[in-house]
Amino acid sequence: MQVMALDRTGFRRFALFVAPALLLLIIGVPAADARRREEPVFAKSAADAALRNRLASLAPTVSPEEARTVAQTAYTTGRELAREWRVVWPPGLQNFLVNSGARKGGLCFQWATELLGRLHALKLQTLELHWAESFAGTVSEHNVIVVTARGQPFSQGILLDNWRYSGRLIWGPVAGDPHYEWEENAGELSRRLQTREVAAR
């Protein structure tokens, strides 16, 4: 009887501690999901080869020249606006300064809008722009631009974010950002482009 009691105790311990661990190992996080939760990385320069190559590899139809121009534009936009808006770290402090009238720009949607306008002006033929938002309608809302090959699903795109590090461009798979769950807002993309066109007249 004592052996059976020990067996039951051992089984309970197995069920409580070992079994869940084994279950995680067996079903765990699928390899694809583990890959998709990679941290976005910094673009090293306006000629960042990794970003350029990643954009070009979105599809065989993507023009390497367009990929190069998009990477360069995204990088330089962040640096130029950081100087123009006198951006400080961290982004939350810049947000406070903008909202209090002490700075002209630097809110996340302003970074995204400016980048959208500059990329749209390139008249891209093989790459497509998307407006992305996370935590929409909350105080934590964040907006970025996502680039895909023309006709490619939003979920396969590359996010371009100048806000998160105060003008230093970061990029990565839109589905891989561990801090945000991105959703496309095609209506907001159209609205912002129309607003810019009206303002330019």
Image (cartoon, helix red, strand yellow):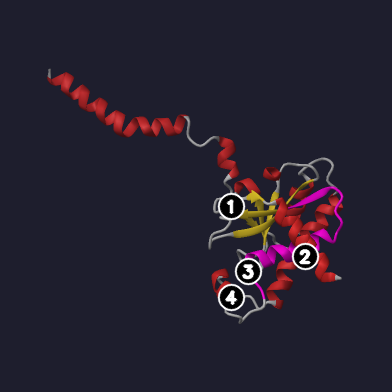
Foreground pick, 47 / 86: 86
Q: Earlier in the sequence, mark 2 or mark 4?
A: 4
Q: Earlier in the sequence, mark 3 or mark 4?
A: 4
Residue at 66%, 64% (x, y): give it.
Answer: 109
Q: Earlier in the sequence, mark 1 or mark 2?
A: 1
Please state which of the two labelled residues, at mark 1 or mark 4, is closer to the viewer: 4
Give the CA separation, mark 3 to mark 1. 22 Å
Residue at 59%, 37% (x, y): give it.
Answer: 32
Please state which of the two labelled residues, at mark 3 or mark 4, is closer to the viewer: 4
Q: Label 3: state its secondary structure.
A: loop
Q: Residues within 10 Å of mark 4 (few under 14, many from 20)?
A: some
Give the CA separation, mark 1 to mark 4. 29 Å
Please state which of the two labelled residues, at mark 2 or mark 4, is closer to the viewer: 2
Q: Which mark is residue 99?
A: 4
Q: Which residue is mark 2?
A: 195
Q: Residues within 10 Å of mark 3 (few under 14, many from 20)?
A: many
Asked if marks 3 and 4 touch (Cβ < 8 Å), the reply is yes
Please provide percent x and percent y for residue 35: 59, 42
The three-letter amino acid code for the residue at tag 2 is Thr
